[in-house]
Amino acid sequence: MEKREIDLAVSCYGKVKDVKYDAVILPWGATEPHNLHLPYLTDCILPHDIAVDAAMLALKRSGVRCMVMPPVPFGAHNPGQRELPFCIHTRYATQQAILEDIVASLYAQSMRKLIIVSGHGGNNFKGMIRDLAFSYPDFLIIATDWFSLVPTKDYFEAEIDDHAGEQETSVMMHYHPELVNLNEAGDGDSKPFAISSLNEKLGWAPRHWDKATVDSGVGNPKKASAEKGERYVKPIIEKLAKLFTEVGQGELY
């Protein structure tokens, strides 16, 4: 089994032109600061690498063949984030247009199943998927967030761990230790809303990043390790491989 069979980032036409694929996997991230120590493309790198591992596992175990696309690097951001250097905010309509163009292309190639693996908490695809279900009734789109599949409490020590903290840093150290500058990391201090109901999640409003964070991170990454990342990501890969397999083999109803 070659990685080039399931990872389009390193594949070529000669490897794929005669192969039947059961589903397409689309990592979708963002371009934004991650504290002072993680790459801007953390939300792209992690869902891509996790999806590749899951696709390889699904192929090995069940013969279901998925193609992992290159990640979409543009996500939705909060006030106070867009003003940070090189943070690129894309509007809902922009993301919707990107997704629709991807679906239209895949549909023309006789693909009928797409799984979005999001690596960015600000992305929300439900409305887009509902709209596209009317335009492409025989095209199945499923969305999942890799970072929500397994609770963090049994793997990490930080009580607050929302952005570029112990979780993301550990997983990045597992996949790409050369990209992590942990000695340069800030403490990830953050400020909650002054309205307690919002902190209790009785309602929602976007956090103003310039007021809520100090170094753009939310959660202290200092106790992160590659070992924690490897242990945490293993059940995530298992769950995604199960999803890829079941979607690739079956129909929605």
Image: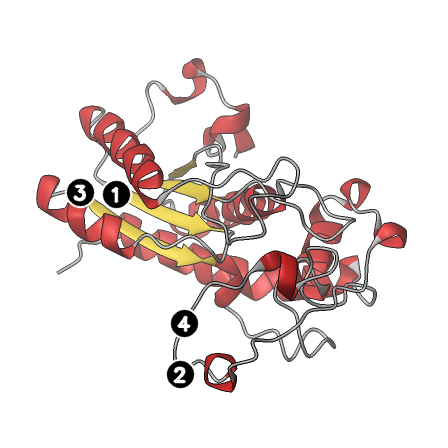
Estimate the x, y position of residue 217 in percent, counting from the top left: 69, 59
223, 216: nearer the viewer: 216
Estimate the x, y position of residue 248 in percent, counting from the top left: 29, 48
Q: Tag 3 or tag 1, which sits nearer the N-term?
A: 1
| Vertical position of residue 186 compared to residue 52: above or below | below
Query: To which residue does mark 2 refer?
Result: 202
Q: Please state if 106 lies on the left or on the right of 57 as rendered.
A: left
Residue 202 in view (yes/no):
yes
Residue type at mark 3?
Answer: Phe
Which mark identifies residue 204? 4
| Vertical position of residue 211 compared to residue 32: above or below | below
Q: Residue furthest top?
A: 14
Q: Tag 1 or tag 4, which sits nearer the N-term?
A: 1
Cα–Cα gap, marks 3 and 2: 35 Å
| Secondary structure found at label 3 | loop
Cα–Cα gap, marks 2 and 4: 7 Å
The reply to whether the C-beta atoms of the residues labelled 4 and 1 are less than 8 Å apart is no
The reply to whether the C-beta atoms of the residues labelled 1 and 3 are less than 8 Å apart is yes
Query: To which residue does mark 3 refer?
Result: 139
Residue type at mark 4?
Answer: Trp
Q: Please state if 221 lies on the left or on the right of 117 as rendered.
A: right
Q: Tag 2 or tag 1, which sits nearer the N-term?
A: 1
